[in-house]
Image: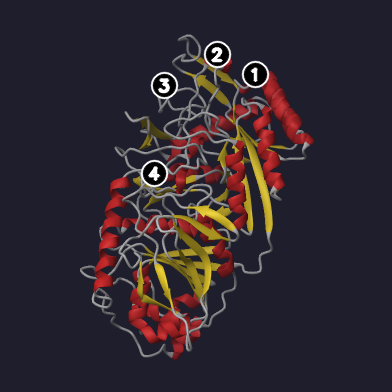
Amino acid sequence: MRRTSQGRRRGRRPLSVVFLLIAALLGTAVAASAAATDTPPPGAASVAPVANVNRASLAGWARTHLAKDQARRAAPHGLLSPVTGLLDTVTSTVGKLLAQTPDSTSTLVLYDTAGPYGYLGELYAMAAANLGGHFGTVTAKPVQQYTPGMLGQYTAAVYLGSTYYGGDLPDAVPAAFYQDVLAATKPVIWVGDNIWNMGNAVGVPQFTQKYGWDPTTSYFADASGSIGNVTQVTYGGQALTRKIPAGQDGGVLRPNVLTGAGYPPVTTVATALDSASGATFPWAVRSANLTYVGEIPFSYVSESDRVIAFEDMLFDALAPATATRHRAMMRLEDISPESDPTQLRSMADYLFSQHIPYGINVIPVYTDPNGVYNGGTPQTETLAQKPQVVSALNYMLARGAVLMEHGYTHQYSNVNNPYTGVTGDDFEFYRAHIDSANNVVYDGPVAEDSTLWAQSRVTAGLAAFAAAGLPRPQLWTTPHYAASATDYRVFSQNYSARLERSLYFAGTLSGGTADPNRFIGQFFPYVVNDVYGTKVLPEDLGNYEPVALNNHPPRLPADLVASAKANLAVRDGIASFFYHPYYPLQPLKDTVDGIKALGYTFVSPAAL
């Protein structure tokens, strides 16, 4: 993913395009050309934004969100949208539809599209749909397309309330959805806004008698009007982080749980900690068929973030019988014709001695088009020209390694993109630059981007492996985890799976043209089939990075192990990281030992 040679080999300076892909939301995980973005080391504990509509966007969304919630508190039923089309009870036909049992596991993801921040709905829906792709098939629709009884066609449904309906914005959620949720036994996970509108629609007594809490008197602020500073969510015995910049936080709904005769018990699934007051309250609750999560957890995430709780909750709705199993996976990164074969063999010997299978991400052609590291003389080397490196790769393959393609040259043209134009330093399929504040800014796909161009890069890379006498790589990892929607589809046509974090662009679910300036980045705790139709293997811990770069702190073995511990909250998750073989062996040993001590078992990427 990046070269950080620390003065080794021709005195190259430390470079870092660390892409935390922070499940992005840089402010919304949406990216755009002139928007400044922070790019932390994969897995950096700090939170980074990912781009346009970006920070200003989430800040605007948060202000609007909290203003509407304040207005609703002032007039608990005055801001609620009137609901039309509601029946006294579901018809027998709808009742039969709701009682259906699907032949296989399937998820219905419903999302908002209305209002000035309606575009967020599709971004969040892609994130939920990708996770649902671990369990089976997924259908994603704008919520207004819901029809009576539709819930019965699926194993479970997820509704992502990203638009706060009420006041001057009419409720776009169909009355049939509110009524079907109440009438059904199918699991429904409701995330974020508008649960109060359901309470109003079906009747507060009916809602509270089934679910044991009153959403119409539940708010994002406490009694003093403050959303506080929620910094931690406890789930599954793990303390998960929540780090949202001031002014960008829309708060977490605090459910008004009722007690006494006539109200069923409500289970607190996860608990939020307000560090400002020291108070705790439910972050997620469950009763009857409804699980409610008090915020959409796909913005400002990290490898130890509260999104882990949501990722595991899906098992309760879609695969409740899943046994607990904790697996780990690793890969060695940025191996090229310029790599040191002695270092590669040393890594192979250690991992073989520990019975650890692993991936090797190989860049088949090394190029320094401007001679940055070669005294001003351009340099290009292929694997076929470096027999000692090829011998070391074969040595690794014989000792448990899985060959993976990591781009063709892992750089673009002869320009700084954003660093030096040299293999391993720069993006290959995406443009980027560094702004005056030392932040990496994502600018969009390269000028030549097309199916034909992307395929030519993959084909040339495969030819370079073949020319060196190496087998065809089994998996693909996108350089610096960034490419266009077109490119991702090309990769899926050539490889059965990607091992990486990825970008998901607006327009993908609607079937329109992908918007290169709006995307959400995401990483996973388990294998998924994503909205591009590709199997994606997880990388959810990041990598060892001893140097602070691009405004992000070092990431040491203890940080990787701490993230692996947080991911124990996922009942069948995979703790996956990568390591650059030009670093010393000891930090790798410390990382492996720490992850093993948590009870993880290392598995081969090829086994997934």
Gap in angstroms between the C-alphas marked 1 and 2:
17 Å
Closest to the observer: 204 or 529?
204
* Residue 546 shown left or right of residue 550 in the figure: right
Q: Earlier in the sequence, mark 4 or mark 1?
A: 4
Instruction: Name the amino acid type tagged 2.
Output: Arg
- Who's the residue at 35% across and 50% down the image? 513
Q: Residues within 10 Å of mark 1 (few under 14, many from 20)?
A: some
- Who's the residue at 47% across and 88% down the image? 262
- Residue tagged by mark 4? 49
Instruction: Name the amino acid type tagged 1.
Output: Lys
**Depth-wise, is mark 3 or mark 2 nearer the camera?**
2
- Who's the residue at 53% across and 56% down the image? 308
Q: Earlier in the sequence, mark 3 or mark 2?
A: 2
Q: Earlier in the sequence, mark 1 or mark 2?
A: 2
Secondary structure of the residue carrying tag 2 is helix
Q: Earlier in the sequence, mark 4 or mark 2?
A: 2
Q: Which mark is residue 414?
A: 3
Secondary structure of the residue carrying tag 4 is loop
- Residue tagged by mark 2? 10
Gap in angstroms between the C-alphas marked 1 and 3:
23 Å
**Depth-wise, is mark 4 or mark 3 nearer the camera?**
4
Gap in angstroms between the C-alphas marked 4 and 2:
34 Å
- Residue tagged by mark 1? 386
Residue 361: give x, y in percent of width and height: 61, 34
* Residue 289 shown left or right of residue 199 in the figure: right
